[in-house]
Amino acid sequence: MATSSARSVFMGPRLRRLRRDLGLTQADMAADLEISAPYVALLERNQRPVTADMLLRLARTYKIDLADLAGDGGADHTARMQSVLKEPMFADIDIPTLEVSDLAVSYPGMTEAFLRLYTAYREEQLALAERSAPDLAGAASFPGQENFDANDPVAEVRRFLAARRNNFASLDDAAERLAHEPAGPAGFIERLRQRHNLQVRYLPPNVMLGSVRRLDLHRRQLLIEDSLDTAGLNFQLAKQLAYLELEDEISAAVEAGKFTSKSAELLARRALGAYAAAALIMPYSVFAKAVETRRYDLEALARQFGTSFEQTAHRVTTLQRPGLEKVPFFLIRVDPAGNISKLLDGAGFPFAKHGGACPLWSVHGIFKTPRQIVTQWLELPDGQRFFSIARTVTAGGGAFGAIRVERAIAIGCAAEYAGQLIYTRDGQGPNADEPTPIGVACRVCHRPRCAARAAPPIGREILPDDFRTSSVPFGFSAD
């Protein structure tokens, strides 16, 4: 009679992928399977086989089919590697397909490292090419750039959202059908208990091990970090409900995106999960009426709906349901170094694809006045005017010594809509204040007398410095 060990297999990379897909640490999985964390580590490193008994335990604990556990055998990594290895730089290297497959299956970490390095290389090539291109926000700069952009998951998801003006009516409709049920933390907790047999438990950060929310289906518990503020708690509860109750709508929207990579698909799913959570907390019809009543006063709206400033600002960018459109906004979130971590464009603002933004825009300077709203009229070189509202927001914290991340967000609209906002003086229109002349990026901004310029514009000849030093960073031959 065969023993369990005789039927054991080595499937460390697939076990690691399963654990990460479930959002678990090795300690989490060990507790679920009633084994030790070091044993999970040995299994993932292929230093111990996965026995038939362990396979069954995995299937029962996480409610998955054994065929799903077997996975695609690294098919996604294999396909990506094969695509990369078609590049001309690898043409003189004979790499059999079988070797690529073996690498992807047996060494997924090394494969991912190679793919990340290659992606970084392509990003640098793109940036170099676009530094000499006439328009940083324009068309492709070299043959094959379109294919590269398609393989950039962040850019792909941003295009997906922009094409739909960051509005998903099916999610809003589904959320509104549930709007008659009690909302807020207490209402959401009760729905989780009654509809899904899930108990909500609050645990300290050292027990949560880096998670703020974790669904433990084995014990029928939703675990929440106990240091979240009310807005954060409300959002995490709503997000879990969205994944449980609006799964069909989220999946349909993701499928409609026809993404070219798993990473893009997962990023889109995360964005849509957050969208659905916001729709549950701030139902479209009720919220759309409130923004008109309060004239887009973000702080007042946040108080009314129990949301954070950023959650509220994000939601106002989504109010573009056909037939019920409100003011179209763009939103950008940056850190003190200027890195963009969120970008939603529903107002036609010409963001640069690469490089830094204009330092004259208040969103880059409001770290000096934290938590204060700063308004600003903006004028682009072509004469387009926008109205911007900027403020800092804080993520993390909640306890002494907890890491806090300070970011700045700005939302804005075209000048013709600004009179509908409470932030304009007496509801005056585009000429209420003198606008700040800004550019998309220094390399495509042709304002010669800008003291904040970091680089000369493309196509302008710089004057020599031998006999005259300009009061601005660069002097130009046409000055």
Image: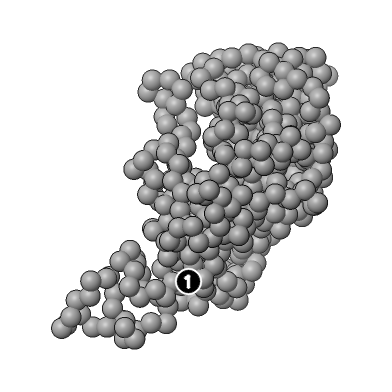
Q: Where residue 418 sits in the image (x, y, percent)?
A: 57, 54
Side of 31 relative to 134 (left or right): right
Q: Nearer the viewer, residue 171 or 383?
A: 383
Q: Nearer the viewer, residue 467 or 303?
A: 303
Colouring style: one colour
Residue at screen point 74% across, 27% down = 241
Q: Where residue 130 sits in the image (x, y, percent)?
A: 49, 71
Name, please, the residue furthest toward the left. 467
Residue at screen point 63% across, 25% down = 234
Residue 77 vertical position relative to residue 467 in the rendered view, above or below = above
Residue 363 vertical position relative to residue 227 in the rendered view, above or below = below
Label 1, on which residue? 381
Side of 343 relative to 80 (left or right): left
Specify the quadrant of the image occupied by residue 59.
top right
Q: Where residue 443 sits in the image (x, y, percent)?
A: 42, 71
Residue at screen point 23% across, 83% down = 464
Name, please, the residue furthest toward the bottom. 478
Residue 57 vertical position relative to residue 362 in the rendered view, above or below = above
Residue 61 vertical position relative to residue 108 in the rendered view, above or below = above
Specify the quadrant of the image occupied by residue 46.
top right
Say whether residue 145 is visible.
yes
Image quarter in which the C terminus is found = bottom left
Q: Nearer the viewer, residue 80 or 342?
A: 342
Determine whether the residue tagged by mark 1 lies in a helix, strand or loop: loop
Residue at screen point 60% across, 23% down = 233
Name, please, the residue furthest toward the front. 426
Q: Give the amino acid type for the residue marked by disc 1 in the picture.
A: Pro
Query: Neighbour class for label 1 at 10 Å: few (<14), some, many (≥20)?
Result: some
Q: Nearer the viewer, residue 179 or 431?
A: 431
Q: Where residue 38 sits in the image (x, y, percent)?
A: 54, 22
Image quarter in which the N terminus is found = top right
